Image (cartoon, grey):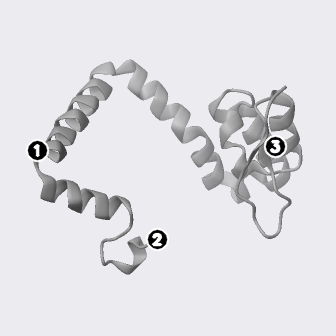
Amino acid sequence: MTAALPMPSFPDRPALSWEPTREAGLAGLQAFHVPMLSPWIRHRLVCEEEVVRATLDRHGFRGAEKFIQEVVWPTYWNGWLEMRPGVWRRYGEAVESLTGHLDRDPALRGRFQDAAHGRTGIPCFGI
């Protein structure tokens, strides 16, 4: 048995919950909760081609072009990174190095924590 987890709701749509089954993902697609299908796409329970086809059927290319780009963009970049493993490795090394700076510099860690929690003093970054 799978547990359903709550997902964000939108005022004009009924709530959808994350149930890790293909059937639940297809039900979300049929109800056209396309922006909320990310968990099913990420776990390959619903594929990008199905989402694109449903979107085109409902909105046509002109009405859906930007959304389609957003759907296929992560797949493109995953493939790009798979062909260039050194890019991801160098990124990981840089993150590790920067994390080390946080460990050695309490003031920097404090500024990082403030930014991560929206305490920057910049209104658009507040929580």
Q: Quadrant of residue 93?
A: top left
Q: Nearer the viewer, mark 2 or mark 3?
A: 2
Task: Tell me the crowding category of disc 2: few under 14, some 14 to 19, or many 20 or more residues within 10 angstroms, Cα based.
Answer: few
Q: CA distance from mark 1 to mark 3?
A: 51 Å
Q: Is residue 64 above or below residue 40?
A: below
Task: Tell me the crowding category of disc 1: few under 14, some 14 to 19, or many 20 or more residues within 10 angstroms, Cα based.
Answer: few
Q: Which mark is residue 104?
A: 1
Sequence-first disc among 2 and 3: 3
Q: Which mark is residue 82?
A: none
Question: Which sits in the foreground, 33 or 98?
Answer: 98
Q: Is residue 27 above or below residue 59?
A: above
Residue depicted at 58% across the width and 46% down the height:
69
Q: CA distance from mark 1 to mark 2?
A: 27 Å
The secondary structure type at the circle numbered 3 is helix
Q: Which residue is mark 2?
A: 127
Q: CA distance from mark 2 to mark 3?
A: 35 Å
Kind of residue at disc 1: Arg
Residue at the front extreme? 106
Residue depicted at 28% across the width and 24% down the height:
89
Q: Nearer the viewer, mark 1 or mark 2?
A: 1
Decide if residue 83 is on the left or right side of residue 69.
Answer: left
Question: Which sits in the foreground, 82 or 123?
Answer: 123
Kind of residue at disc 3: Ala
Give the quadrant of the N terminus: top right
